[in-house]
Structures are given as structure tokens and as C-alpha cells.
Amino acid sequence: QLQLQESGPGLVKPSETLSLTCTVSGGSISSSSYYWGWIRQPPGKGLEWIGSIYYSGSTYYNPSLKSRVTISVDTSKNQFSLKLSSVTAADTAVYYCARYIIAAANYYYYGMDVWGQGTTVTVSS
Amino acid sequence: EIVLTQSPGTLSLSPGERATLSCRASQSVSSSYLAWYQQKPGQAPRLLIYGASSRATGIPDRFSGSGSGTDFTLTISRLEPEDFAVYYCQQYGSSPSLTFGQGTRLEIK
């Protein structure tokens, strides 16, 4: 059974870079048709997609965050990572990693079917 | 960029009643790219529906999705106590990109 686990500092200072890692267990990050994403949820608010990556290294970012976001993959460790630079209090949120499937044959989207439990990141001095 | 608008913001119903949640897109969305999620407090979202109308693995058949174009609906036929939660629609779009609606809170009346 595929499981995802986020890890990283729970407290980041303003203007610094937030760094999180998602470890994939019970399956390979290199499977075709699987994409790996980061989603965040500020306290009491809705979900916001940050960006995604394919095992080949292709990345896709939310235009509103693109200038500050870098997502990378380490297939040898079965992990993918998020870096968000120049953080402010507005970046305080629960950060989730998730898997979604897009069928190569017909480009069908099967939804985000596996999620990590989420990790809370607070931006404060 | 496609914007998803969910209504109502809050829906107050009793167990056993039928719930109808709406998701309207600012531009036409392929049904293949529309999903619904349920989120309970302190938990990660759970996939309910993909492809606008296909139930995800293990989802009870009281949950159903429908719609096309710009208007999509999530229906819960007979509410169980565990169904009271926040529901989000999501679309997978060009670029590619992913967008969530702002959510509908389903609360016990």
C-alpha cells in the first residue's frame, strides 16, 4: 500500500526558504503515469496546489507561486522535495504531498488518490 | 486560469437527508478532469469522485457525481453522520495545472 510522509522544519523565519521532503513508501516514485504534487492549506482556509513533478524531472507550478517554488525528485531515495523561498506569514499552512495519476494513453485524470498526513509549517521570527 | 466556485458555502442538513453540492467553472472543463474530495478536521483530503462521476476505490455508492461543461454536482443520497465535512471540487487543466474550489462545509442541522 502506497504511503506518503512529509518531513521538514515546522518553523521557518520570514524571508528564509521553506524546505520539505515527501518520502514515498510501498511503491516506486518512478512508475509511469504517476505524478507527485504539493498542496497547502492555510489555517481555516481551503486547499491550494503549489506544484507537481514527474519522475523524469518535469515540473509544473502554480503561476501565483512559480517565482518562489522549486520542486525536485530523487528517485534513488524515492523522495520528492519542495523549496519555497522568501517566505512570509502568508505561507504558514499545513503542507501536503500527494500522488495523482494521468493515463498516458488518453490523458485521463484519476485524481489525487494518495495523500500524506500533512505537516504544519509556521513562518515566524 | 479556470476558477471553480462552489455553492453553497455552508449546507446545513440532517442525517438521512439528501445533499446537493455545486461546483461551477469559469470556463468549460472536460469531465475527465473534474474531481471531488472530502476533508474532515485534522485530516488530509480524501478522493471521492474522479472523471466527474466515477467513484474512487472504497467510496460508498451514496456518493455520486454528475455534470459537464461548467456545472458539476456532488450528491450524497442519504447523509450518514460521518459525511459531515468539507467538500472540495478540483480540476486538472492545461499548462498543466490544478485548481481547487473554495469548499462547501456540510454541517449537521
Image: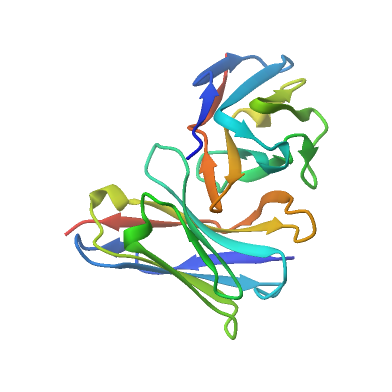
Residue found at x 58% / y 63%: A36
B77 shown above or below A52: above
Residue at the left extreme of this rendering: A125
Residue nearest the viewer, comparing A41 with A55: A55
Across and down, in percent, residue B26 comes to 52, 28
A91 shown above or below B22: below
A88 shown above or below B35: below
Across and down, in percent, residue B95 comes to 53, 53
Residue A8, quarter of the rendered image: bottom left
Residue found at x 80% / y 28%: B62
Residue nearest the viewer, comparing B39 with B74: B74
Across and down, in percent, residue A83 comes to 37, 68
Q: Is residue A95 left or right of residue A110?
A: left
Residue found at x 67% / y 18%: B20
Across and down, in percent, residue A64 comes to 36, 49
Task: Identify the image quadrant of the C terminus of chain B.
Answer: top right
Q: Is residue B11 left or right of residue A62?
A: right
Residue found at x 37% / y 58%: A66
Residue at the right extreme of this rendering: B61
